[in-house]
Image (tube, grey):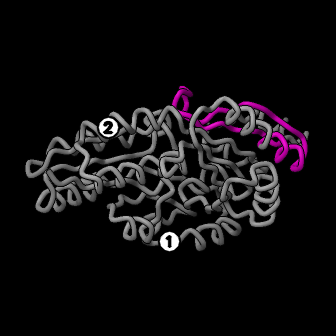
Amino acid sequence: MTIAIVTDTACNITPAMAEEMGVYILPIEIMIDDQNYKDGYDITTEEFYEKMVTAKSIPTTSQPLPGAALELYQRLGEEYDEILSIHLGSNVSGAVQTLELIGKEVETAKVTTYDTKLVSLPAGYLVKEAKRMVDEGRTMAEIISQLDILREQSIAYASVHTLDFLVESGRFPAVVGTVAKLAKIKPIITIKAQDEKGVGVSEKVRTSKRANNRLIELVKEYTDKLDYPFQLDIAHGNAPEMVAELKEAVEEAFPEHPIETHVLTSVIGAHSGPDIVGIFIAPDLNN
């Protein structure tokens, strides 16, 4: 049985990455000043962050277009027996539910939608592991079972330095956000599947340096409890200086771990803002 993997750009996978991996992608729609863009196709991540600086209003996002999803599923159904469609969590978007309904209309292949209950790097990690298992010849049932385990073992901590975007997206209450901005508070957010909202504000610190230090502390507290090898990645919106400082601190705290740096895709940046840095933790299946 042949299996195709489909995902979306909210899983922090760009069209170029998808092509290299051998997976298929449904772009999230982004609106900037009344102009619609297909994330990764009509606008690159770099162009998005440039436009964000001059935009009159905070960008908004919407689900992949149903017509585009149906067209992709039908086209893949001509080549593959099954389709595994992996997407950002239902706790932050209705995309999974919509795509599940669309998948039922496809007669040429069985479409299975998978709710990551995550966003960004943690969700993208599941996509990459699913493709690895497909290449190993694993069955759909085996892949889903393993993804369920990996989903629970994936977590990310991030510090947000500009609150306007979180407030606009509804992830941070407006009144609290105003107070936080006045007090120059940097919220620490946690991304994990066990969180009802997918993304939760767990702590608040006052300076960028304290934010980085607290991120390291949280990662240490989490990884000290693990009894299996783990990988660490760091990511940022459009904050090269902040991420460079964080990477240096992570490498000092975890010298035995190679650290990769990722830029958050446009759809994530639209909700988090450009001034965000974070650390992602997941099982390292290569060890």
Q: Looking at this view, is 227 or 153 the one in front?
A: 227
Location of residue 198 in the rendering, given as x and y in whole percent from the top left corner? 55, 34
Q: Is residue 77 left or right of residue 24?
A: left
Badge 1 crowding class, 10 Å Cα cut-off, few under 14, some 14 to 19, many 20 or more, is some
**Bounds of the magenta segment:** 186-215
Q: Quadrant of residue 144?
A: top left
Give me the disc on residue 144.
2
Location of residue 217 in the rendering, given as x and y in whole percent from the top left corner? 80, 38
Q: Residue 38: within the magenta?
A: no
Q: Looking at this view, is 282 or 176 the one in front?
A: 282
x 72%, y 39%: residue? 219
Location of residue 155 in the rendering, given as x and y in whole percent from the top left corner? 59, 38
Label 1, label 2: how many angstroms apart (C-alpha)? Answer: 32 Å
Q: Looking at this view, is 154 or 271 the one in front?
A: 154
Give me the disc on residue 43.
1
Q: Is residue 198 left or right of residue 144?
A: right
Q: Quadrant of residue 243?
A: bottom right
Residue lying farthest to the front in this orientation: 287
Does dot 2 land on a helix, a strand or a loop? helix
* Kind of residue at badge 2: Ile
Q: Quadrant of residue 282?
A: top right
If you read the primary sequence from the N terminus, does the residue marked by circle 1 or circle 2 appear first? 1
Location of residue 196 in the rendering, given as x and y in whole percent from the top left corner? 53, 26
x 17%, y 62%: residue? 75
x 15%, y 57%: residue? 80
Q: Is residue 176 left or right of residue 101?
A: right
Q: Residue 194: within the magenta?
A: yes
Q: Looking at this view, is 276 or 58 the one in front?
A: 276
Mark 1 vs mark 2: in front = 2
Instruction: Tell me: residue 14, above or below residue 64.
Output: below
Give me the disc on residue 254.
none
